[in-house]
Amino acid sequence: MNATNFQILPDQSQLDQMQRDLRFYPSSVTDPQVLSREQVAQFNRDGYVSGLRVFDEPQTLRNRQYFDQLLAKVLASGGDSYSISTAHLKYGPVYDLITNPRIVECVADILGPNVIGWGSHFFCKMPRDGKSVAWHQDASYWPLTPSKTVTVWLAIDDADRQNACMKFIAGSHHVGHLTYRPSSEADHNVLNQSIDNAEQYGAVVYDELRAGELSLHSDLLLHGSEANLSDRRRCGLTLRYCTPDVRAGAEWNKKGVVVRGTDPTGHWANPPRPALE
């Protein structure tokens, strides 16, 4: 299984033609409203912030029940637990999550007052599914420049080391864009890229989250996850946000919703909430 199963991704030649700016741009927010100044500084230093509670138990349960129903429909139609991508353009409740003020306010404390939400993808590791996510940088896949995307990883289920939570290489976003190799079937990799010897770039940190919590990480931060060998599911919803000055190729601007402030560039399509529940 590779990333092309999830969404239409441009090939490397298309990405190279964009001459993307793949440098880390630190947050310049000095008066955050939800995060602390220390957390903004941590994001700039380490590339991530984790353990942010955004939903109480009733809302967390509603999120999980909704995903359970959605997953059942996708499986019945021939999809799998990794194939629910660009979900905010298809399903109203996911649009409601990518625009949810509690989530967006956390992101705005990193990106600033104007925020575009352009990506949404459920990463659901079923019990004992045996697939890992190799070390990678999100920015490698995307026809976006400059690299100013923050990923929210919203825990639908509890995620810990036993059921293969995400892991980061702290500070690796400062290294720049790294050379990767194509994954082989022997890697049992959910994605199609692998960066070898990633541990040389920093310390491994496990992103353990309770359901209803989220983490934020830079699009240049090395991250991945191990195979889920437990009897518990591990589902998270990734939500991708950027600043309006980011340019998108391959018509990816059609995915972008203005979730806070304005888009003075007019580049992002700002589609409405879909009717499908």
Image: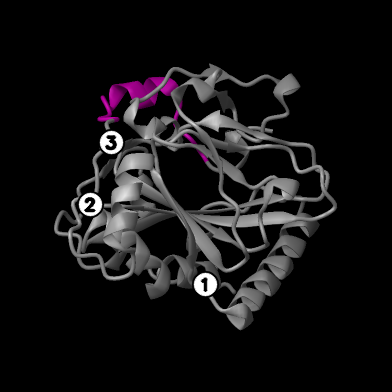
Q: Amino acid at mark 1?
A: Gly
Question: In the shown orientation, is residue 114 left or right of residue 160?
Answer: left
Label 1 sits on a secondary structure element that is helix
Q: Position of residue 87 (x, y in %)?
A: 54, 59
Q: Which residues are magenta?
A: 8-22
Q: Position of residue 170 (x, y in %)?
A: 44, 37
Label 2 sits on a secondary structure element that is loop
Q: Amino acid at mark 2?
A: His
Label 3 sits on a secondary structure element that is loop
Residue under label 3, please give it: 24
Question: In the shown orientation, is residue 118 left or right of residue 120?
Answer: left
Q: Specify which label sits upstream in the sequence, 1 or 2.
A: 1
Q: Identify which residue is drawn at 82% across, 48% down.
A: 230
Res 66 label = none
Q: Which quadrant, please, contains the N terminus?
A: top right
In three-dimensional space, the C-alpha distance between marks 1 and 2, rounded to whole angstroms, equals 23 Å
Residue under label 2, please give it: 267
Residue 257 visible at all: no
Q: Amino acid at mark 3?
A: Phe
Looking at this view, is 89 or 31 the one in front?
A: 31
Front of the two marks 3 and 1: 3
Res 92 label = 1
In the rendered image, residue 88 lying in the magenta stretch gets the answer no
Farthest residue, direction left? 264
